[in-house]
Image (cartoon, helix red, strand yellow):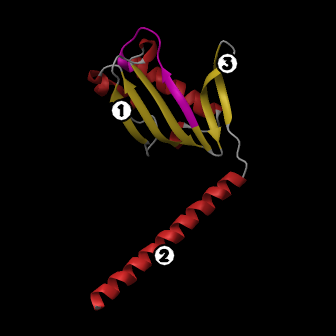
Amino acid sequence: MKTMKRRNTIKKLFASLAGVAGISAVAKANTAESTNIEKEAFNVVEDQNVPLFSGSTKLGNTVFVAGKGAHFDGDIKAHTDHVLKELEKELVKAGSSMEKVLKVNVYLHDLADYKGMNEVYKGRFGSKPPVRTTVATYGGVPGDSLVEMDCIAYI
């Protein structure tokens, strides 16, 4: 009997904590919606006069940079250097920097280029590098680039 009573008490406690957490999440979401934050888009690419994608977008103090590739003949090191410089240009335009990058996605044409890409990538984001995901793409990176990268940063 005591065990069943204790279980019911614990269940009620967890249910009330979950309820408070749920109400808190809804309150935070409503607060964010009521601040009227507007998205800004930069370097919009159009297809037949219709916006297709942006080079970067900002929402509040967060900037999202679209994938950058290197569309010229060269090895993985030259492509990686070019891509990182292009990311940096977009970040600076948006009021951020490489040191403020939180997340990077790296898409390699060939996983065999992982080591060469890392050699150039290393140290480019300061002493506190962002989290990173690296994948080799099936069928290659668009535009014959050996590497493409996108990122998320704060301002």
The answer to which quarter of the image holds residue 149 is top left
Give the mark nearer the N terminus: 3 vs 2.
2
Q: Residues within 10 Å of mark 1 (few under 14, many from 20)?
A: few
Residue at image x 30%, y 85%? 4
Label drawn at residue 16: 2
Q: Residues within 10 Å of mark 3 (few under 14, many from 20)?
A: few
Identity, as a three-letter code, of the amino acid under mark 1:
Thr
The reply, left or right, for residue 6 in relation to residue 54 is: left
The answer to which quarter of the image holds residue 122 is top left
Do the residues bearing badges 3 and 2 touch, measured as CB atoms within 8 Å?
Answer: no
Verify whether residue 49 appears in magenta. Answer: no
Q: Viewer-nearest of labels 3 and 2?
A: 2
Vertical position of residue 112 compared to residue 25: above or below:
above
Give the mark nearer the N terminus: 1 vs 2.
2
Instruction: Give the spatial CA distance, label 3 vs label 2.
Output: 50 Å
Label drawn at residue 50: 3
Residue 15 in the image, given as x and y percentages of width and height: 45, 73
Give the mark nearer the N terminus: 1 vs 3.
3
Residue 8 in the image, given as x and y percentages of width and height: 37, 82
Residue at image x 50%, y 26%? 67
Label drawn at residue 134: 1
Instruction: Give the spatial CA distance, label 1 vs label 2.
Output: 41 Å
Vertical position of residue 140 compared to residue 4: above or below:
above
Magenta extent? 64-77
Q: Secondary structure at mark 1?
A: strand
Considering the image in quadrants, where does the N terminus appear? bottom left
Identity, as a three-letter code, of the amino acid under mark 3:
Val
